[in-house]
Amino acid sequence: MNNVIEAPTIEYGTLAPLLLVFAAAVVGVLVEAFAPRYLRRSIQVPLTLLSLVGAFALVLVTVVGGGVPTEPVAMGALAVDGPALFIWGVILVLSIVCVLLINDEGHFVASAASVPGSADEEEAERAGSAHTEVYPLALFAVGGMLMFPAANDLLTMFVGLEVMSLPLYLLCGLARRRRLLSQEASLKYFLLGAFSSAFFLYGIAMLYGYAGTVSLAGIGQAMTTGAALDPLLLIGFALAGVGLLFKIGAAPFQAWKPDVYQGAPTPITALMASGTLVAAVGALLRVFWVALGNLDWNWRPVIWVIAALTMIVGAVLAITQTDIKRMLAYSSIAHAGFLLVGVMATYSAAEGNAVSLQAILFYLLVYGITTVGAFAVVTLVRDPGGEANHLSRWAGLGKRSPILAGVFAFFLLAFAGIPLTSGFFGKYAVFTAALGSASEAGDSLGGWMTGLVVVGVIASAIAAFFYVRVIVLMFFSEPAADGPAIAIPSAGTVAVIAVSLLVTVGVGLYPEPVLDLAQQAASGLFVR
Amino acid sequence: MESPAEIIQHTAGGAIGVSWLMIALPLLGAFILLVFNRFTNRWGHLLGVAMSLASFAVAVLAFVELLGLGEDQRRRAVRLYEFIPSLKLDMGLLVDPLSVSFALLITGVGSLIHIYSIGYMSHDPDRRRFFSYLNLFVAAMLLLVLSDNYVGLFIGWEGVGLASYLLIGFWQFKPSAAVAAKKAFVVNRVGDFGLLVGMFIIWTSFGSLAFKDLGAQQIGTASDGTLTAIGLLLLLGACGKSAQLPLQSWLLDAMEGPTPVSALIHAATMVTAGVYLVVRSGAFFEASDVASLVVTIVGVATLLAGAIIGCAKDDIKKGLAGSTMSQIGYMMLGAGLGPAGYAFAIAHLIAHGFFKADMFLGAGSVMHGMNDEVDMRKYGGLRKYMPITFATFMVGYLAIIGFPFLSGFYTKDGIIETAMEHGAWMGWLAVLGAGITGFYMSRMIFMTFFGEKRWEKDAHPHESPSVMTVPLILLSIGSIVLGYFLIMDNRLMHFLAPAVGMPEHAPVPHVFSTTTVGLSTLALVAVGAAIAWMKYGRAQVPAVQPRGSFLTTFARRDLYGDALNESLFMRPGQWLTRIAVYFDNRGIDGLVNGLAAGIGGSSGRLRRLQTGFARTYALSILIGAALLTGALLLVGNI
């Protein structure tokens, strides 16, 4: 018998981006513990930004250096393949711009422990104290986001999920204004997140019971040899699916999104709406492809219903929203539905897979960037009591601040998928991939796919209504006499809006390089 | 007949490789001037001029580079990027003799108009905005002529429509300008519609909108009906932009814009777009006899109509506008004659670009000195007060009537001679048009520069500053020599051959042609000019418009074109909209509003599920999980 435990092999080079972010987060915690209060911010901000930029550079080095591994790394725990690297790059870019937003003044509470409206709170504000813990927390969340979609076995995935989520629960409760709403959001997110994690974990247990392994490839392998339609497998898949669908906010698991997006500090909302969504879609894709690819005849009808429901619920409910952040939350739900249409397009033929994978990766990039830009604009429209999020306060914004309103209108058009914006090509790519797989799949399945695209187009039309409604409100209504002030943006926020606008316009006019990049990332598919 | 050369992918760099700069530079200028608006007030006009000149420089370099290549190498496609992959649509430019000829004209004459505008618009508080629109106009027009596919052409086409709308309505505080801008836009939409439907048919028939896929061989397989339909629809588009019958009505009203705009629209851009479209789509017209016949009919009808309208106008700019219609009619006629006519049409287009810009800017110079008076009945005897304007205008005048050895003499004569070979009727009608041109242009000259002073009391005519006169001088030099240069030795024909093909029997140009046609043209022009001298030179011009005969009224009212449009289209259209609105309110709105209310209502009801309680949300997750599991088990067991 061989009792010797072999030392695990870790590909440090490939994992460097992940390790760098986690290491910086740990250092950030140490800074909180040992550095004097007045110095912390000036250490944390550069530390956070540099580590994220460094991680992004390391991703580039891996890609350019041709070092994309063709095998899972870290003893099969992580798969740093083309799609994962693309998603890493996207998440890192999004988190860099989100950190620039976080860095702006006035989003976070002075002292989270003080009771809202109490004397303690006033005192903390007067003393000018601030929670610089948000930076390491954000770094941990980003680390989790990197780990989640690259996980190659279900346990690692679960760890990634939790590392991503726990800091976010906390960050949600740290808004400076309307603190009760923020704390409520935090608690709800935590409760529901824990609930869905439990489902996910239970699903993992079931799948382990079926396959005898938690490795994604192993589960896929087991299906080719064992009983394909074992109830253990089906139940396990359903429950694990609930956990993943919860994170991307697909109906009927979407209820948390509006409340949490509304209550959380807007920079954190931006991080969740972009980074978390990208990570969760990445993880969902990996599970569906690598582990459950052979089961596609079973999950396809179910995901069909969920995708259609998600698009409709997101688009229809957004119409009656009166809060700009809630409206964007519902829009995010609708977009999760559009992404699920892309997931549906994964017809087994390898080529079809690459096309739909490319479409989804492209969509994630352009949607994430536009989202961050839109939320950045939201942070700038302010009342004396904080952000003016009620839509009635946005009336006539175009007359008083034409540039800001124009930029926001452009982002909305991109969400709606109007041509010459990046959003158009995103939607176009996803729907084309779905139609392509429809023609490939043949009669019955093809008809269903086409039907889903029709539902998607109808949902887009409904969604266009509420996007345009905001534009009409901004440009064709008389401004209120006591309308909100436009905060003078800090350099960071200007940079965020400018970058988002440039990408949205640039990709809308000249999508080819980004499409090529996504295609290159998708061409190798997921490693097993 | 020699067919056009193959289009070759251009991989080398050089000026052709960066030909996109031609479009990008003026576009950048427009962008900067519009975005940084007030901050650029002081130097905005200079930036506009610089961008236009830089674009011209690139065009010249590309032209020189093209000349350095072998004849069958002169159609260079420059691929920019993949635009819409699933439509197999790449954004690309086609640099060939045809597009370069246009680019040189657009940027060259366009730059002179830019420079002139510095002086002309110097008192206008919105000069910077004016220059941004001018730059936009030039950029759009360059995109139109340089694109290597119909989609890019169409984008430029619409851009030109937009820029012309903005410029015609530049003084939007004048209701007449606002109306004229709207009219130009609406009439152009009719043509755009034709072009668009034509593009749809091309796409469905041939599966591509790139010029390289639409050569004579590739389209040969299509049926006659298809080719005719494509040709007629493209012609409808060309009629809109080039103000040909029946879509001519916007052109005369377009004079509401500042005069440099009129020069730009009439000489270098916009109206030439239709001729470009017909020549560029030559393969379709050559393949369909019906379509090419209709082109010549439209051309002949318009050249006569424009000339007749020009006879009766007292507004100097409207008189010139009538003459533009007429001259574009000549080009259209030439373009409808196939490869034999293309070179003359383009030569006339280039020459016209110079002498018409010369005369429009000259008219602007006159107006500048006469408190913006446009009524020629209030001019008279101006030649002594504005010598340079007079001399340059005179050159333009001699060129347009086809005075021997000036530009128009060679180019117009070429079109008439070629038309005569195709059909005597069109040839003689074109000769008649030339005679009428001699009359109305002479009338303009006599009323403006000769005779007695009929000025308003406060008029103090004076010569314009040199920033306005220098462009005039340059343009008149072009008006003198270009015709001879382009036509002699069939220079332009040989140059254009790789792009549009060569006729079987190339004509032999003469320095002074002594054919019956040539001589009778000259004779008719002389008669026309003599009549004009008798009526307006020797006799006194009444300061108030006389009632005039039936024919005069007919011409004054633009041949009742507007009345026709109003009774044929506007009033029935208004009735139709009224009926449609009625049904829309009752039927369709009911449906749509009902649908919207339904969605809104379901949104309101669904919203109640969002209670705000975490327990409700958890319940929905639980139910969802149960359904998901149940569904999977169910599907698994079917």
Image (cartoon, coloured by chain):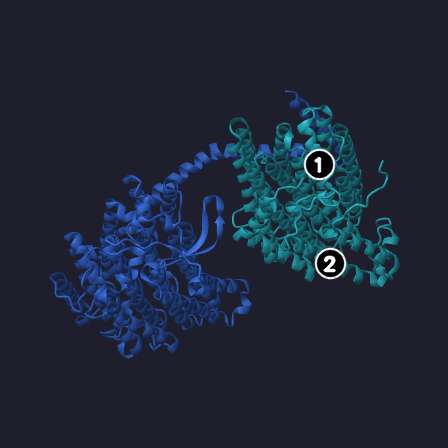
The percent coordinates of residue A388 (x first, y second) are: 70, 51
- Which residue, given by chain and number where applicable, does mark 2 sit on? A49
Q: Nearer the viewer, residue B500 or B317?
A: B500
The percent coordinates of residue A177 (x first, y second) are: 77, 51
On screen, B462 above or below B345? below
Q: Quadrant of the C terminus of chain A?
A: top right
Q: Nearer the viewer, residue A197 or B563?
A: A197
Residue B470 lies in what quarter of the image?
A: bottom left
Chain A appears what colour?
cyan
Chain designation of label 2: A
In percent of the image, x 55 and y 68: which residue is there? B39
- Which residue, given by chain and number where applicable, does mark 1 sit on? A216
What amino acid is at disc 1? Leu
Is residue A103 in view? no
Q: Residue furthest front?
A: A1
On screen, A275 above or below A122? above
Residue B393 lies in what quarter of the image?
A: bottom left
In percent of the image, x 47 and y 62: which residue is there? B24
Instruction: Nearest to the eye among marks 1 and 2: give it.
Output: 1
Secondary element type, mark 2: helix
Q: Quadrant of the N terminus of chain A?
A: top right
Secondary element type, mark 1: helix
Q: Would residue B81 appear left or right of B358 to someone viewing this image?
A: right
Neighbor class of circle 2 (other Cα within 10 Å; few <14, some 14-19, many 20+) is some
Q: CA distance from mark 1 to mark 2?
A: 33 Å
Who comes first in sequence, dot 1 or dot 2? 2
Chain B appears what colour?
blue
Q: Would residue B34 appear left or right of B399 to someone viewing this image?
A: right
The percent coordinates of residue B438 (x first, y second) are: 19, 65
Is residue B353 in view? yes
What amino acid is at disc 2? Leu
